[in-house]
Image: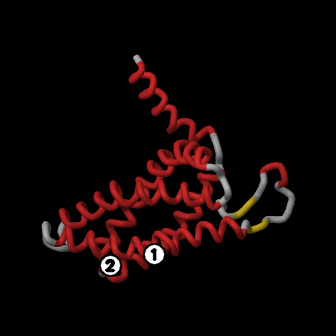
Amino acid sequence: MGVLSIPDKDKDKEFKVDWRRVGITSSFGFAFVGPIGHYWYEYLDRFIRRRFQPNTFKFVASKVAADGFLFGPLDLLLFFSYVGLGQGRSVEQVKEDVKRDFIPALVVGGTIWPAVQIANFRFIPVRYQLLYVNLFCLLDSCFLSWIEQQGDAAWKQWFTSFQKIEDHKSKV
């Protein structure tokens, strides 16, 4: 849906794939998720394995927490920046887009990725963890692309309204 363009006003027109957008999101996976993800999962396993017995609750929970609090936000920040710049947006526009899209994507992703990663870290051997995650990354890329395409949708404004409350409190 995100990499597919279906303008609201032209619902009766033929559905078309936005190949430029597909290329941008795919190249992000090849340039970032693939290489960085490979080393991330290996390092994370070595680091957590030194602290906890493998496949225990603490072992899996620590890996899920580290992935969710470190890798997840970095991935989102880089994804929205890369896609925005790849589409020819200015740095200022990309900053605004990230400000608008980051929190909604983080919250929604935070409801899905922990379950994916619990299964990953508990049952999948480290050498196959990136492959397993990439199956979900395909869906996630479509979702993130869709979020990015939504602009200032009302549902996203609900998330950012909390930020405005905090900004107002800090000024008082």
Query: For the N terminus, which image quadrant?
Result: bottom right
Outermost residue to the front: 91
Q: Using a 10 Å C-alpha cutoff, classify the residue at mark 1 as few (fewer than 14 neighbours), some (14 to 19) or many (20 or more).
A: some
Residue at 18% across / 69% down in the picture?
56
Q: Is residue 139 shown left or right of residue 37?
A: right
Could you tell me residue 164's position as x and y percent? 49, 29
Q: Nearer the viewer, residue 110 or 164?
A: 164
Q: Is residue 110 shown left or right of residue 7?
A: left
Could you tell me residue 116's position as x and y percent? 39, 66
Q: Is residue 101 shown left or right of residue 6?
A: left
Q: Does residue 172 lie above or below 51 as drawn? A: above
Query: For the C terminus, which image quadrant?
Result: top left
Which circle, 2 or 1, is nearer the viewer?
Answer: 1
Q: Nearer the viewer, residue 100 or 7?
A: 100
Q: Using a 10 Å C-alpha cutoff, classify the residue at mark 2 as few (fewer than 14 neighbours), some (14 to 19) or many (20 or more).
A: some
Q: Amino acid at mark 2?
A: Ile
The residue where tag 1 is placed is 34
Could you tell me residue 65's position as x and y percent? 29, 57
Could you tell me residue 146's position as x and y percent? 62, 56
Q: Quadrant of residue 48?
A: bottom left
Q: Amino acid at mark 1?
A: Gly
The residue where tag 2 is placed is 124
Residue at 21% across / 74% down in the picture?
46
